[in-house]
């Protein structure tokens, strides 16, 4: 035979543990050896539960890697002898290392999508007009020296100008729009490269309460205490032309994230609910009211009922885990909140 394509024997090294790992069950070593020998393979025994398999020339075309040998053993062993069971599912619900910002991003993205928001991806560069429309300062932005267009001339310091434009560009549809973006912003540093900070930007054309509910859902999912008022607090809610927007520092969320929520047993005693309306002013904000209210040992939680014409109505839940309280006791505590 003078054919130049005559195949030669080849050698492959494989560990016995690979068979169990790939097939899903442990096949006795003697059975593996027997199958390989009967198929025409040679075997040299090595240390550490490994073997060197001699692949004959007539199998040199289709046996190239150790996994090919695993497939041969599984085929002869019989697929019908391999139990049809699902492998255990490993959930990456809570990242072990919260510095893995990409894993954390995916957690937030999944939550926001479940809440009905649509993800958008915008350019990291924006125009001068977008900066000015967003009430931001040009001098805080890094200008590209070789920009190909005025539309992408500056590195953005906020996600909100782009999200606002997304809402405005689609406003003709007369539909509810709820957009979010998780991306970097770039903060100018003197005589150095800009700081790259991950932000969560959210914009909606619904209302203040809708956006506030989204923010609360994020904080609740991450087991972070949330406190917000329309006049201040963190994060801020901005309204412009019927578009409500907010921006959250992703790294700060990571720093405050509690992987395991604190256990709190159910209260066996009755809860007394009382409503009270406050007139908002610079001296009376939700944050201040909340701070004063929680000085009471009877208060369990506060809920927002309505917010209209600078009047805030809150619902206070009073109870004790050791005994029933009277309505008079609850009213006395509420009277101290003013």
Image (cartoon, grey):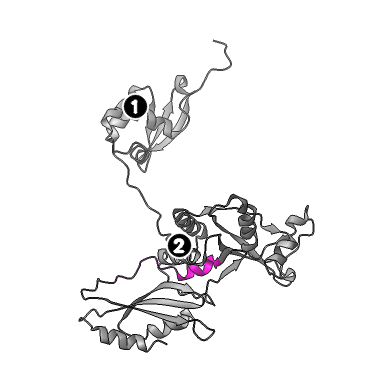
Q: Residue furthest top?
A: 1
Q: Which residue does the image show at 36% across and 43% down from the upper left?
A: 48
Q: Which residue does the image show at 46% across and 33% down from the upper left?
A: 65
Look at the numbered disc 1 and give the secondary structure of its residue: helix
* Residue receiving disc 2: 97
Quadrant location, the C terminus = bottom left
Residue 292 left/right relative to 88 = right
Picture disc at residue 75: 1
Residue 142 left/right relative to 322 = right
Q: How many labels does the image show?
A: 2
Residue 248 left/right relative to 88 = right
Point out the frontmost of discs 1 and 2. Answer: 2
Tell me the CA gap for discs 1 and 2.
41 Å
Binning the other alpha carbons within 10 Å of mark 1 as few (below 14), some (14 to 19) or many (20 upward) gives few
Residue 238: x %, y % from top left: 58, 69
Q: In the depicted view, which residue is nearer to us: 77 or 250?
A: 250
Q: Is residue 188 magenta?
A: no
Q: In the depicted view, which residue is nearer to us: 193 or 67?
A: 193
Quadrant location, the N terminus = top right
Magenta-tinted stretch: 247-265
325 versus 90 height, above or below: below
Picture disc at residue 216: none
Q: In the depicted view, which residue is nearer to us: 266 or 250?
A: 266
Q: Are marks 1 and 2 in contact (CB under 8 Å)?
A: no
Residue 241: x %, y % from top left: 62, 64
Indicate which disc, 1 or 2, sits on the residue closer to the N terminus: 1
Binning the other alpha carbons within 10 Å of mark 2 as few (below 14), some (14 to 19) or many (20 upward) gives few
Look at the numbered disc 2 and give the secondary structure of its residue: loop
């Amino acid at each position: 035979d003078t054919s130049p394509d005559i195949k030669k024997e080849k050698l492959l090294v494989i560990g016995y543990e690979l068979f169990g790992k790939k097939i899903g069950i442990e096949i006795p070593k003697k059975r593996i050896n027997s199958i390989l020998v009967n198929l025409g393979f040679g075997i040299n025994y090595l240390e550490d539960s490994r073997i060197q398999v001699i692949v004959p020339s007539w199998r040199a075309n289709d046996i190239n890697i150790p996994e090919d040998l695993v497939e041969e053993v599984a085929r002869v062993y019989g697929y019908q002898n391999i139990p049809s069971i699902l492998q255990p599912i490993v959930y990456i619900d809570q990242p072990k290392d919260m510095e893995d910002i990409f894993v954390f991003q995916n957690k937030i993205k999944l939550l926001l999508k479940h809440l009905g928001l649509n993800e958008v991806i915008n350019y990291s560069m924006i125009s001068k007009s977008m900066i000015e429309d967003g009430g931001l300062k040009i001098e805080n932005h890094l200008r590209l020296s070789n920009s190909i267009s005025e539309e992408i001339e500056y590195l953005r310091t906020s996600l909100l100008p782009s999200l606002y434009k997304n809402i405005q560009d689609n406003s003709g549809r007369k539909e509810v729009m709820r957009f979010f973006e998780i991306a970097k912003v770039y903060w100018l540093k003197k005589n150095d490269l800009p700081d790259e900070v991950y932000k969560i930007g959210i914009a909606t054309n619904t209302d203040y309460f809708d956006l506030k509910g989204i923010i609360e859902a994020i904080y609740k999912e991450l087991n972070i205490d949330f406190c917000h008022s329309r006049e201040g607090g963190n994060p801020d809610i901005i309204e412009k032309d019927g578009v409500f927007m907010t921006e959250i520092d992703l790294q700060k969320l990571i720093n405050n994230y509690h992987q395991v929520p604190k256990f709190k047993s159910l209260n066996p005693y009755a809860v007394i609910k009382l409503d009270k309306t406050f007139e908002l002013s610079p001296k009376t904000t939700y944050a201040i009211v909340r701070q004063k209210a929680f000085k009471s040992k009877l208060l369990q939680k506060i809920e927002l009922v309505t917010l209209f014409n600078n009047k805030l109505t809150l619902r206070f839940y009073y109870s004790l885990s050791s005994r029933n309280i009277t309505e008079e006791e609850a009213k006395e505590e509420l009277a101290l909140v003013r």
